[in-house]
């Protein structure tokens, strides 16, 4: 019985958010009664210090922008691979005007979620990537 009581106490203390506030990554303020455990099914929760809890909208914006940047970079690298060229054209500073226009088109397509359907959203992004591949290697448009 003592072991069962100890196990229950351990479980209760691990579910107590106030005791988790010492963790540098609490997904809710330490004064919140809700549990901040992340599950295997969602990785959208992350743990933050309570002092940052007041700035959650900025943190969400940073996460969204970071995700968009990473996905956009991967799509641009995919375009170079499809075009059969290396990525040196993407590293120029400043970018060639045609490449810069394609970059802007891709960024706009990725940020414009106000379209009629998910399919249209994905098609717009696909078109922007194909345009970038064509700009990187004009021979791609002939295939």
Image: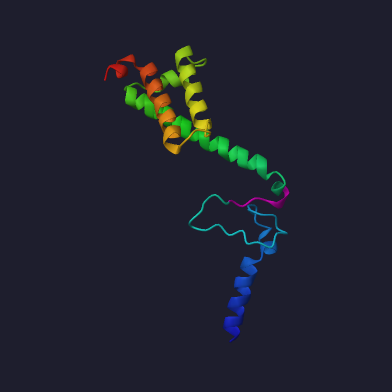
Residue 48 included in the magenta stretch of the image: yes
Camera-side residue of 94 and 82: 82
Along the viewing direction, whichever of 46 and 126 lies nearer the viewer: 126
Question: Where does residue 93 sit, x and y in percent of width and height?
Answer: 51, 16
* Display coloring: rainbow
Residue 49 image point, x, y percent: 68, 51
Residue at image coords 60%, 71%: 11
Q: Residue at x 61, y 73 (%)?
A: 10
- Residue sticking out furthest to the bottom: 1
- Is residue 65 on the magenta stretch? no
Front residue of 124 and 64: 124
Q: Main secondary structure of the magenta part?
A: loop
Range of residues picked out in magenta: 46-51
Query: Is 31 drawn above or below residue 118 in the view shown?
Result: below
- Place residue 58 in its image quadrant: top right
Q: Position of residue 68 (x, y in %)?
A: 52, 34
Which residue is pictured at 72% across the width and 46% down the height?
54
Pick the front one: 141 or 18: 141
Q: Is residue 58 left or right of residue 41?
A: right
């Amino acid at each position: 019985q003592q072991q069962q009581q100890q196990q229950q106490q351990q479980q209760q203390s691990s579910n107590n958010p106030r005791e988790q506030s010492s963790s540098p990554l609490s997904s809710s303020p330490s004064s919140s009664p809700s549990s901040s455990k992340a599950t295997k099914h969602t990785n959208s929760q992350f743990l933050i210090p309570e002092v940052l809890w007041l700035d959650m909208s900025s943190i969400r914006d940073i996460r969204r922008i970071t995700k968009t940047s990473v996905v956009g970079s991967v799509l641009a690298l995919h375009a170079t691979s499809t075009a059969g060229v290396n990525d040196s054209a993407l590293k120029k500073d400043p970018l060639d005007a045609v490449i810069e226009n394609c970059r802007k088109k891709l960024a706009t397509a990725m940020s414009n979620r106000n379209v009629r359907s998910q399919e249209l959203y994905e098609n717009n992004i696909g078109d922007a990537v194909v345009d970038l591949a064509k700009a990187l290697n004009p021979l791609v448009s002939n295939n």
